[in-house]
């Protein structure tokens, strides 16, 4: 009998091995279509083959492995996540969702389980979007949402996407071949670190995702009036920073009131001098919720409150929306199957939503989608301190094994 503890340790060690493929010395940084991406794909393919899978790379640089059942025209259950990282990122964000299913396939192979479907695992080449500035390039190629205009996007060194693809050995004229639109996909399941503190707080190894939050983003500019810090009386000022400060507090309060998350993460101030009243302050707003309607309700209140504050502090306010995405719900049937699988292993099935975007959002365009979160230390991600426990990988393997059994029963 294969020991899940050993398999989990293997996954953990493989995460360490993949962490060696980094384009920057002393930190984790693996971006789309780099030499390190190539190395990570090759290493992952090696493990896929060792687990009993056939492997290939698609026309977008995504790495695939396939574990065939005995019925050639059977449908496919797809697992996967991304193999790229942010600069100075962690070893598990994305990577865990590629390596854990490989361990699962190894177990299925060793125990000779007869399944009514094929299993494929995909390691997406780009989710983070840190090289060409747009996210989810890998999964968008697969969902058929590729945009040829991206080919001209340049990285920091002036290399455009089409050049990078050619250097990687890919033919962008064949990119449509990466689309799985006409594939017989039963479902897509993504395993991912939580990137938040909820599971740790609840003392649970895994959790089931209900939906992936939809974000809206805006850049808000405030125009006040510059003046001498010593000579302009307080009651005659049009101080853009003072207006901003009240606005940031209002955003925070309104988000709490509506149960959404809102963040002012970017701030620019002009002229930014010690003895000058600020004349221009620009800041970002990122607002997300599991429910689009709730998010938009909070956003509407933020908009009207900011207008009130702009008037009160005598600044001109300009609002530019820069991003809008709808929340993507996980498939209810798959979600409850994952919940049952978690309960089968003796763990309380906690459902939580994902505040971060994932490849699964794109795959939801193709087939039913579900996600399983794995606890991570203090909820830290996109940082070298990102950490997981081997025991939690073992717990997720138990859940996945039960999930496969239940899924096979449903699809026989
Ligand atoms: Zn990720």
Image (spheres, rainbow, N blue to C red):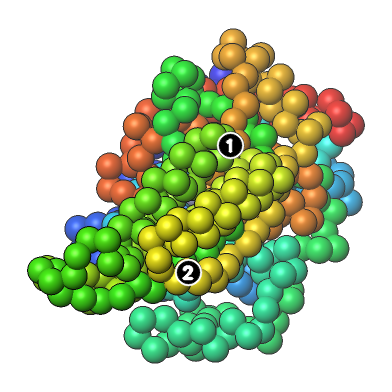
Location of residue 325 by image quarter? bottom right
Location of residue 242 by image quarter? bottom left
**Count of labels shown?**
2
- Foreground mark, 2 or 1? 2
Residue 177 seen by the camera:
yes
Residue count near mark 2 (Cα–Cα under 10 Å), binned few <14, some 14–19, many ≥20: some
Please give the residue where the numbered disc 2 appears in the rendered image: 317
Location of residue 275 by image quarter? bottom left
Kindly report the distance in space between the C-alpha atoms of the residues bearing marks 2 and 1.
Answer: 24 Å
Residue shown at 67% from the left, 42% from the top? 294
Q: Position of residue 266 (x, y in %)?
A: 36, 62
Up/down of 160 relative to 334, above or below: below
Work out whether residue 286 or residue 325 is closer to the camera in this orientation and state it.
Answer: 286
Query: Which quarter of the image is occupied by the C terminus?
Result: top right
Q: Secondary structure at mark 2?
A: strand
Please give the residue where the numbered disc 1 appears in the rendered image: 258
Up/down of 213 relative to 198, above or below: below
């Amino acid at each position: 009998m294969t020991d899940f503890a050993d398999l989990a340790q293997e996954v953990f060690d493989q995460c360490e091995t993949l962490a060696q493929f980094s384009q920057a010395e002393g930190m984790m940084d693996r971006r789309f279509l780099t030499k390190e991406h190539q190395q990570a794909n090759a290493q992952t393919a090696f493990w896929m083959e060792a687990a009993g899978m056939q492997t290939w790379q698609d026309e977008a640089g995504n790495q695939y492995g396939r574990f065939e059942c005995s019925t050639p025209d059977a449908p496919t259950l797809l697992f996967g996540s991304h193999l790229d990282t942010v600069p100075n990122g962690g070893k598990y964000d994305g990577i865990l969702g590629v390596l854990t299913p490989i361990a699962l396939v190894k177990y299925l192979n060793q125990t000779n389980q007869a399944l009514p479907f094929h299993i494929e695992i995909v390691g997406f080449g780009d989710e983070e979007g840190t090289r060409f500035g747009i996210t989810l390039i890998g999964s968008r190629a697969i969902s058929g949402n590729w945009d040829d205009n991206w080919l001209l996007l340049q990285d920091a060194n002036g290399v455009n996407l089409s050049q990078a693809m050619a250097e990687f050995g890919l033919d962008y004229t064949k990119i449509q071949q990466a689309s799985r639109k006409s594939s017989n996909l039963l479902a897509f399941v993504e395993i991912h670190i939580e990137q938040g503190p909820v599971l740790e707080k609840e003392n649970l190894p895994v959790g089931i995702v209900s939906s992936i939050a939809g974000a809206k983003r805006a850049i808000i500019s405030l125009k006040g009036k510059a003046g001498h810090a010593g000579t302009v009386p307080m009651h005659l000022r049009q101080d853009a920073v003072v207006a901003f400060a009240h606005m940031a507090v209002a955003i925070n309060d309104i988000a709490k009131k509506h149960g959404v998350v809102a963040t002012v993460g970017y701030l620019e101030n002009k002229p930014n001098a010690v003895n000058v009243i600020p004349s221009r302050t620009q800041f970002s707003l990122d607002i997300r919720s599991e429910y689009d309607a709730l998010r938009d309700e909070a956003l509407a209140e933020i908009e009207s409150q900011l207008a009130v504050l702009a008037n009160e502090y005598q600044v001109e306010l300009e609002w530019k929306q820069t991003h809008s995405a709808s929340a993507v719900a996980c498939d209810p049937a798959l979600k409850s199957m994952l919940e049952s699988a978690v309960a089968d292993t003796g763990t309380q099935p906690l459902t939580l939503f994902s505040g971060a975007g994932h490849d699964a959002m794109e795959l939801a365009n193709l087939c039913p989608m579900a996600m399983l979160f794995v606890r991570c230390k203090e909820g830290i991600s996109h940082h070298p301190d990102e950490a997981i426990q081997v025991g939690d990988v073992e717990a997720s393997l138990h859940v996945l094994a039960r999930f496969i059994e239940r899924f096979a029963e449903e699809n026989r």
